[in-house]
Structures are given as C-alpha cells and as structure tokens.
Amino acid sequence: MKTKQTKMLLIDANPFTSSKNKEIERMIETADNGEMLVQLMRKKMDGLNHHALMAKALENEEKVLPFIMERTLTNRQSVFIENAVAFFLRCKTDISGWILENYDTFKSEYMKQFLCLVLGFKGDTEVIPFLMNEVIRFEKYYPDKDYNQGPILGLQEIEYRFFNERE
C-alpha cells in the first residue's frame, strides 16, 4: 500500500504534473510578447508544454518571428535551435530568402544543417545547388557528425514536392 508521501513523490516525478512543468505552463499562458515566447523556447519542457508553446508562438507569428530570426543568428543552444526549427517548419512565412542571405552569419553548424532542412520544406527548386554544396561541405568538414542529413533530407523533400509524379 502506497503512503501519502510516496504518492506525492510519484506525482512530482511525473513530468505531466511536476511543479516545474506547471510553472512553465503558467509562463506560456502569461507570455504576452514575442520576446517572452522566444525566451521560453530556450527552456527544456515536457511535450504538452512544448505543444502549447509552439501553438502560442504560431498564433503570434508576426510578433515572434523577428525575435526568433535575430536569436537564430548567434544561438548555439540545442533546445532553442530545435524549437526555432520546429517553428520555422510550421510558420506561414517563407523564410528561405532570409536563410540564404544570412547563412554565412549563423554561428552554429548544428543550426545550419537544420536550416537546410527548412529550405527543403519551404524553398523552391533554386535551392537545390546550394543544398548539394552543403551536403559536400558537411561531409568534408564534419565527417564524424550527421550534419549532412539536413541538406540530404531537404533535397528529398524538394524532390517529393516538385518532381514526384502524383496520381
């Protein structure tokens, strides 16, 4: 038979009910500007809060997008990078031109490989040579990393969207 203390430990250990996740949930609910939402994108959180954060960020795309774009240029934190890419893939704005214009400015190769993926989902066939060159560059300079997968998957998405014969 479980004691009250054991039950409380189980509740606190549950990522869906922990006080940290409840705090993050409140922060998402009360975030009232783009900068606050972008700050939250730097925090690790459970899946429910991640979903709520992405939904709120996408609802406020015009306010959030400039802050995410600015942060993306210099940020090397994997949690933020992954959240930013998730946002870029779902947002209505086509940021392909911005990615290509600023590509050499991005400080993180981890971010760059994901931006190649975004180009595959958002860009046009004109990005194919760029993505092919990035596959080669990543394979040459980062043979021990999987960075080449971003542009490879981007190319596969372009193939599917533009060259796949559908019935």
Image: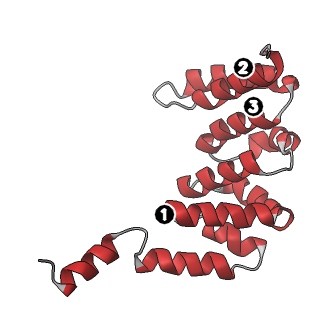
Do residues under tags 3 and 1 come within 8 Å of each other at their CB atoms?
A: no
On the rendered structure, is 117 left or right of 127? left
Q: Nearer the viewer, mark 2 or mark 1?
A: 1
Can you identify the residue that label 1 sits on?
46
**Residue at the image point whose x is 65% and y is 40% from the top:** 114
Looking at the image, which is closer to me, 152 or 32? 32
Crowding at label 3, few (<14), some or many (≥20) Cα neighbours within 10 Å?
many
Residue type highlighted by circle 3: Gly
Q: Which mark is residue 132?
A: 2
- Residue 72 marker: none
Q: Which residue is label 3 attached to? A: 120
Mark 1 or mark 2, which is nearer the start of the sequence?
1
Q: Is residue 71 left or right of residue 4?
A: right
Residue 41 visible, this orientation: no
**Residues tagged 3 and 2 counted as in contact (Cβ below 8 A):** no
Q: How far apart are the alpha carbons under marks 3 and 1?
A: 28 Å
Specify which label sits upstream in the sequence, 3 or 1. Answer: 1
Q: Is residue 166 above or below residue 50?
A: above
- Between 101 and 58, the one lying in front of the other is 58
